[in-house]
Amino acid sequence: MRNLLISGLAVFAGIVSLPARVSPNQTQKAPASAGYQQDPRLKRLEKFFQKAGCPAQKYSDTFLEAADAYDLDWRLLPSISFIESTGGKAARNNNLFGWDSGRAEFVSPTAGIQSVGYRLSHSRLYRHKDLDGILATYNPDAEYAEKVKAVMRRISPSE
């Protein structure tokens, strides 16, 4: 009975912490009807990841979907994933971002992208911060923000 209660609380806590707009269990890519197939950002992002041989290339539309849904610079999530896991090359447990010092596990890379995007937009730790504030909170290393911003400029010189 105790184990059942603990399991139920863990499940409840997981449900409560999920983003309301996107299911983290989403495993399929956004449909072409989402409008990203003709989006020039998609081509730039795919080209960037392809050049580096990154597995994250196949989630390019998901990065854009998350950025648009959570009002983030469209280059931010891909850049963090590139710094943290070389765009998925070194990702474990579908964690492209090294989230929770690499301990976080996501049911899919898509769920990880949506979850981290949601948190960067809605968590009290990140909410209402500019790019430098978000990056300083994400990783307080003095050089981290500039590394991420350099990748952002490689993807596209401006937002």
Image (spheres, grey):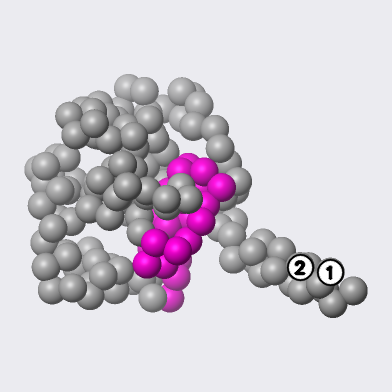
Other residues around mark 1 within 10 Å, as few (<14) / some (14–19) / many (≥20): few
State the image coordinates of residue 93 (x, y, percent, origin top left): 48, 50
Q: Of 125 and 142, which appears nearest the observer?
A: 142
Query: Which label is found at residue 7?
Result: 2
User: From this viewpoint, is residue 145 visible?
Assistant: yes
Three-letter code, disc 2: Ser
Numbered tag placed on residue 4 in the rendering:
1
Q: Quadrant of residue 157?
A: top left
Gap in Å between the C-alphas at discs 1 and 2?
Answer: 5 Å
Q: Is residue 40 visible?
A: no
User: In the picture provided, is 106 more to the left or to the right than 127?
Assistant: right
Q: Secondary structure at mark 2?
A: helix
Pick the quarter of the image with the N terminus: bottom right
Give the magenta part as a residue range. 100-124
The answer to whether marks 1 and 2 mark residues whose Cβ atoms lie closer than 8 Å is yes
Tell whether position 105 is magenta: yes
Q: Nearer the viewer, residue 33 or 57?
A: 57
Q: Amino acid at mark 1?
A: Leu
Q: Position of residue 66 (x, y in %)?
A: 41, 46
Q: Is residue 49 left or right of residue 22?
A: left
Q: Position of residue 98 (x, y in %)?
A: 35, 59
